[in-house]
Amino acid sequence: MADKEANNVLSIRSMCKSFGRNRVLDHIDLDVKEGSIMGLMGENGAGKSTMMKCLFGTYKKDEGTIFFDGKEVNFSGPKNALENGVAMVHQELNQCLERNVLDNLFLGRYPKNSLGVVDEARMKREAADLFRRLNMTVNLTAPMKTMSVSSRQMVEIAKAISYDAKLIVLDEPTSSLTVREVNKLFEMMRNLKAQGISLVYISHKMDEVFEICDQVSVLRDGKLVMTKDTKDTNMDELIAAMVGRSLDNRFPPVDNTPGDVVLSVQHLSTKFAPNLKDITFDVREGEIFGLYGLVGAGRSELLETMFGVRTRAAGRVYYKGRLMNFANARDAMDHGFAMITEERKSTGLFLEGDLTFNTTITNLEHYKSGAALSKDKMVKATANEINVMHTKCMGPSDAITALSGGNQQKVIFGKWLERDPAVFMMDEPTRGIDVGAKYEIYELIIKMAKMGKAIIVVSSEMPEILGITNRIGVMSNGRLAGIVNTKQTGQEELLRLSAKYL
């Protein structure tokens, strides 16, 4: 066929998909060449995930044809796709956390010996060979729950590669990786490309797309609006294609004016590993205080300890001179603290609920009429947050799982905004969010700071931490390596401090 002659491993022709009256994909045509890396970009809700789910058979497409490796295909589900050479690594990791690395690698395909017993020796041998080939060091018997998000991500990528896939889809694979791990991933991707394997790289990080991808395609409102070689386009053109308008700057002006110290953390240490050691810092009223560091440096653990969900060994937290050593998260919430967690699906959302449930769950007392909850008040509050956050959905009754990852993140923001917190702690608040929505989140953070709220932002993206904060605390191996003024620092100093206690 013509597509095969053009060396396309994947060709999608006129793909359409609707949910009720909402058309999510509108006659999509997409080609992925053999031995190439295709970047796939678009705002949250543009249709990227829906298109991939139609490819993998998770959703049934309404119209269109899919050609893979020269043949028309209609996969019945991800397992069928995987068995036919198409693999996907999801941003939200779906792993058996109680089981070890080996079990997660071979789940559903355990090799057996001549006696019909699972051949663990073969599993260890094949897994060791795989990780050696990928230049990765992994404890094969370690339970997944003991590993960092970044390590679990790398295991999932290795699992996809182990199926000898001809096409691998990577969905935001670097969202939880360190700079070193990103470089290792890119090296791995280039090696796969050299072997003739094709990759689709879904990402909101434009600098990475230009670094690793041969071509880039952009979806907007369910339509494919651009496909170009990366060498023939630039960041401004990509942004304009994604959001339908140009963004003069990636970050709004940080024009808040911090006041007096309102939050004071003194000599904070944790009882259990990973350990924090003697951390002291202050945050002023109306200040955006950033926390930077390598993955595993203790940034998330610091927020969790302050929020009362991790056990302190020593230290105190004061807000406006009052002791705030919380016993649990409810205690923290009752004292005006809010926290967005890094992993939205496991710790930020109730996946069985709708938008209304997820938006109002932290503030139920506010929606009572007498002794009973008022459904009308809850729906009205949810509709207001949908409007404020520009969440793409059909309405308050939508299932939370029907939303894209970025729009789910907006619901989490809305949930906490309903409580009007005095101290807002955010762990990777723009993870998996597109450039247009990021800008809106940045504007919201600055607006909250100008209202006098104390804000702490954890981010692994150095341009982001330098673009939206007043000061930055740099973590290194469970210690605070230093605090710098954002306007007087740069990437080199942040990297130097992040390695101080390694």
Image (cartoon, helix red, strand yellow):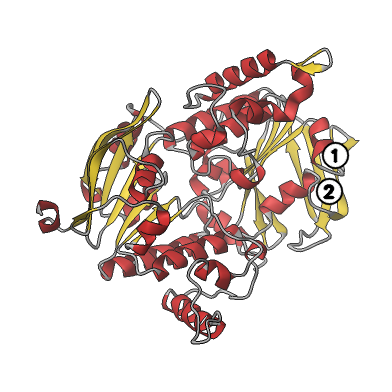
Task: Count residues near mark 1 (Cα–Cα under 10 Å), then give few for <14, some for 14-19, many for 20+.
Answer: some
Viewer-side residue, 119 vs 305: 119
Task: Count residues near mark 2 (Cα–Cα under 10 Å), then give few for <14, some for 14-19, many for 20+.
Answer: some
Tag 1 secondary structure: strand
Q: Position of residue 30 (x, y in %)?
A: 23, 44
Does residue 488 appear anywhere in the picture?
yes
Q: Are marks 2 and 1 in contact (CB under 8 Å)?
A: yes
Give the quarter of the image for residue 249: top left
The residue under the point 41% across, 70% down is 162
The residue under the point 42% across, 44% down is 204
The residue under the point 46% across, 55% down is 173
Three-letter amino acid code of the residue under disc 1: Tyr
Three-letter amino acid code of the residue under disc 2: Gln
Give the quarter of the image for residue 501: bottom right
Q: Position of residue 390 (x, y in %)?
A: 50, 24
Q: Position of residue 36 (x, y in %)?
A: 25, 59
Placement of 129 over or under 59, stated as above or below: below
Viewer-side residue, 469 vs 6: 6
Task: Look at the image and tell me in which quarter the C terminus lies.
Answer: bottom right
Indicate which disc residue 266 carries. 2
Q: Is residue 492 left or right of residue 43?
A: right
Indicate which disc residue 201 carries. none
The residue under the point 25% across, 54% down is 214
Q: Earlier in the sequence, mark 2 or mark 1?
A: 2
Tag 2 secondary structure: strand
Indicate which disc residue 318 carries. 1
